[in-house]
Amino acid sequence: MEQFEPDRLSAAQLAAMRRSITGGRGALTRRSLLRASGVGALTLGGLASLSACGIPPAKRAGDTAVASDDRSAEEKEINFSNWTEYMDTSEDEKSHPTLEEFTKRTGIKVKYTEDINDNVEFFGKVRPQLAAGQDTGRDLIVVTDWLAARIIRLGWAQKLDPSHLPHAYANLIPQFRNPDWDPGRSYSYPWTGIDTVIAYNAKATDGKKVDSVTQLLDDPSLKGRVGFLTEMRDSVGMTLLDQGKDPANFTTADFDAAIGRLQKGVDTKQIRRFTGNDYTADLDKGDLAACLAWAGDVIQLQAGNPDIKYAIPAPGYITSSDNLLVPAHARHKANAEKLIDFYYEPPNAAQLAAFISYVCPVDGVKEDLAKIDPALADNPLIIPDKAMAAKAHAFRSLSSEEETAYEEKFAKLIGA
C-alpha cells in the first residue's frame, strides 16, 4: 500500500500534534493509561470485580429497558464526557469550534468534560450509579468497544432513536456498521476508529520494509528492537492474523497458540518490550526499529520524521473503535442524539478528523477534509480506501469468563 507522506499540516493539526505528543491523548492514551493505572485491574481481581461486586447479572441487549424521563425539550443542555485531546480546539485552545457551532445551530449548550482517562477507572466511577438505576450526570460518553459491549450487555445504555440520527444512519462507513456486540448500531455510534498497524523507522532498519508480524518476531536484524502493545486485543489479534486465524472467530486453543508465539519472542529477547503508546519516542529515535502502532500516532510521528513508515500486513490488521453511548437514566437523550447526528455530517466530521488524526467513521467526508488539508484527505489511515478497509478485522467480543482468563494470561506474558 502506498505510503502517506505529509507535505504540510494545518496550524490546527500542528498544534494538535504538539499537544498529543507532549501532554494529552497521544502521551497517555486510553490504552497506555489502562496499563499505567495498574494491569492488575484487568486481571483476576479487576475483571472479576467488573462482573461481580454489586453488578447484577448481565442482561441481553434486547431486554434493555432503561428509557429515562427525557427532559430534552425543556432543558436545552447536554453533559458530554470524553477523553482528553479528543475534540477539535481553537488555536488559542480556549474553545471547541464544532461544539460552538452545534450550540449556535440548536440552542443546546454542551457541558464538555475531559474526565475519561482510562476505561476501567471510568467504569468504576459510574458503575455504582448505573447499578443503582441512577442518573450518572452524563448524557453522552465515549468508551472503547469492549467496555461499550459490557455496558450494553448489562442493560446500562439507552437504545437510540433512529429517527433522530438520519446522518449517522446514512453516513456510517460499512467497516463499523455491525460489531458483534451491537449489531446494526442500536445503542452506539463510533466517535472514531483505531487501527493497529506495523510502524518502522526506515533509518533503523537500513531501509528494509517491515510488513509482517512474522518479521517482527523472527527477523534477526530486528532482535531486541521490536515493540508490541500492552493492549491484549491488539497484540494477540495481530498475532492471530499472522497465524492464519480470524480474530472474530477463534478458540481458546488459538489464543493460547498466539500467546505462545509471543512468549517465544520474549524468551529469545526478540521483543524489547510491551508498551502503551510511549513507543512513539523510541520509534522516533530508532531505539525501536519496528513495532505495532496505532495509526493516529503514526500520522503524528510522520509529520516530524520522514523515516517513519507504516505497513499493513497481508493478512490484515486489527481495528477497534471508541463509541458514543447514552447511559441509562440520562436526562437529555434526545439532545445527545442530536449531537451524535451532528458529528455525522461530513463538514463537522472533517473538522474533528483533522484535529485528532484517527480513523474517521463518516462516509463522504473526503471532500470536506481536503478543504482543510489535502494531505490528510488522501491518508488511508484517516479515510480508509477500499483496499485497506477490506483488510480490517475486529477482535470478537469475549464473555466475562474469557475476558478474565485471557487478560490473566496476557498479563503474565508481558510481566505485569
Image (cartoon, rainbow, N blue to C red):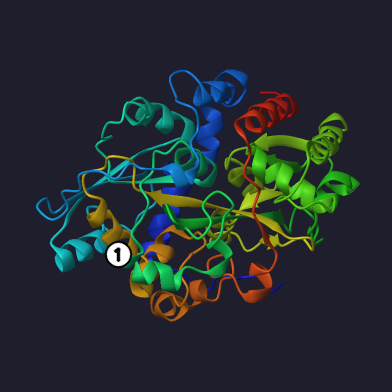
Residue 318 falls in which quadrant of the image? bottom right
For numbered disc 1, what is the local secondary structure?
helix
Q: Is residue 342 visible?
A: no
Q: Is residue 394 visible?
A: yes
**At which x and y percent is residue 326?**
34, 47
Give the amino acid at mark 1. His
Q: Residue furthest front?
A: 63
Residue 339 falls in which quadrant of the image? bottom left
Q: Residues within 10 Å of mark 1 (few under 14, many from 20)?
A: some
**At which x and y percent is residue 340?**
33, 60
Q: As drawn, is 181 to the left or to the right of 410?
A: left
Q: Looking at the image, which residue is at 56% across and 22% down?
A: 48
Q: Nearer the viewer, residue 158 or 11?
A: 158
Q: Nearer the viewer, residue 82 or 60?
A: 60
Image label count: 1
What quarter of the picture does the C terminus occupy?
Answer: top right
Q: As drawn, is 158 to the left or to the right of 272?
A: left
Q: As drawn, is 293 to the left or to the right of 6?
A: right
Q: Nearer the viewer, residue 103 or 29?
A: 103
**At which x and y percent is residue 379?**
56, 71
Q: Looking at the image, which residue is at 28% across and 34% down?
A: 136
Above or below: residue 194 compared with residue 267: below
Above or below: residue 38 compared with residue 160: above
Q: Looking at the image, which residue is at 74% across and 57% down?
A: 203
Above or below: residue 54 compared with residue 143: above
Q: Which residue position holds label 1?
A: 164
**At which x and y percent is residue 40?**
58, 21
Q: Looking at the image, which residue is at 57% across and 43% down?
A: 277
Above or below: residue 24 compared with residue 316: above
What quarter of the picture does the N terminus occupy?
Answer: bottom right
Q: Residue furthest left?
A: 74
